[in-house]
Amino acid sequence: MLSVGILICSPQVQARDYGQHGAIFPVIERDLLKQIQSRLIAMQKSGEMDRRNAELKSRTLAKVERPAPVAGLINARATRSWQFDPTIMLADDILDAKGKRIWARGARVNPLDSVRLRSDLLFLDGDDAGQLKWALAHQKKAKLILTKGAPLLLMRTQKRRFYFDQGGKLVRHFGIKALPARVRQNGRMLEISEIALLPDRRSAQ
């Protein structure tokens, strides 16, 4: 502390001006909200905003009418079937409405013990006329799930409900590689079949 006091009180300690090193630029700040507002007003006056809204609406409707197809699927060349165990291990406790624990974390639960699969699930390429004809003719009670095509258009023309496997989550979950494919309940298991359609009569097992 003594040395610090000496330095502070000493008349020989002087501040020095080391001059200017490098370029110095003025700080210019703009109000971001005002800038955005000005841009929006200009877009509105020029009609650019209306054009962009129309383009966005058109793209959104196009995606709804025809979602992105699921990649990597082929037409089944041979019929094959396998069993799928839907049993899952719970990551957390399952509680009822009153907070009472129904299932404990870590328990293995088969959903088919509580809820049956009410109808077969049929996965198909909605742009394949043969798959579509076979599905409508032979699977009247099945849930038709598209991996490609226009579900809303088919609902309007065929007068029945179609679903779409967004992002291919279901086909990946079941291990489906080829179409059409069928998922049906077989006791406590699910039987999954990739079905090769005969080109002459488009029928299957």
Image (cartoon, rainbow, N blue to C red):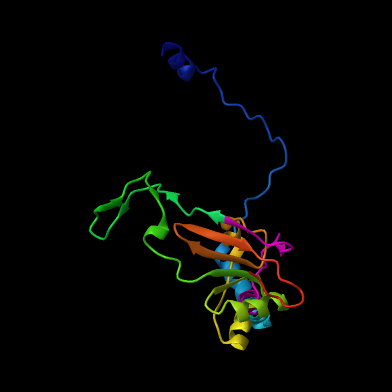
Toward the right, the furthest residue is: 200
Q: Residue at the spot x=24%, y=55% of the render?
A: 99
Q: Nearer the viewer, residue 74 or 187?
A: 187
Which residue is the extreme one toward the top?
2
Residue projecting furthest to the front = 205
How many tags in the picture?
0
> At 59% across and 68% down in the image, what residue appears?
36
Relative depth, front residue between 203 and 183: 203
- Residue 57 in picture, x, y percent from top left: 62, 79
Residue 149 position, x and y percent, is 67, 75
**Which residue is found at the position 70% from the left and 66% from the top?**
196
Give yes or no for residue 138 being in the magenta stretch. Answer: no
What range is drawn magenta here? 58-82
User: In the visual, does 46 lie left or right of 185?
Assistant: right
Visible residue check, residue 52: no
Task: In the rendered view, tell whether residue 157 sits above or below residue 95.
Answer: below
As for residue 65 lying within the magenta part, the answer is yes
Asked whether residue 2 is in view, the answer is: yes
Q: Nearer the viewer, residue 86 or 60?
A: 86
Task: Write down the quadrant of residue 38 in the picture.
Answer: bottom right
Image x and y of residue 128, in percent: 72, 75
Q: Which part of the image, by quadrant, shows the N terminus?
A: top left
Residue 154's spot in the image, x, y percent? 62, 82
Task: Classify 132 as above or below 3.
Answer: below
Image height check: is 158 above or below 121? below
Front in this rendered view, residue 19 or 180: 180
- In the picture, measured across the screen, residue 113 lies left or right of residue 31, that is left
- Specify the quadrant that holds the C terminus: bottom right
Q: Identify the image quadrant of residue 171.
A: bottom right
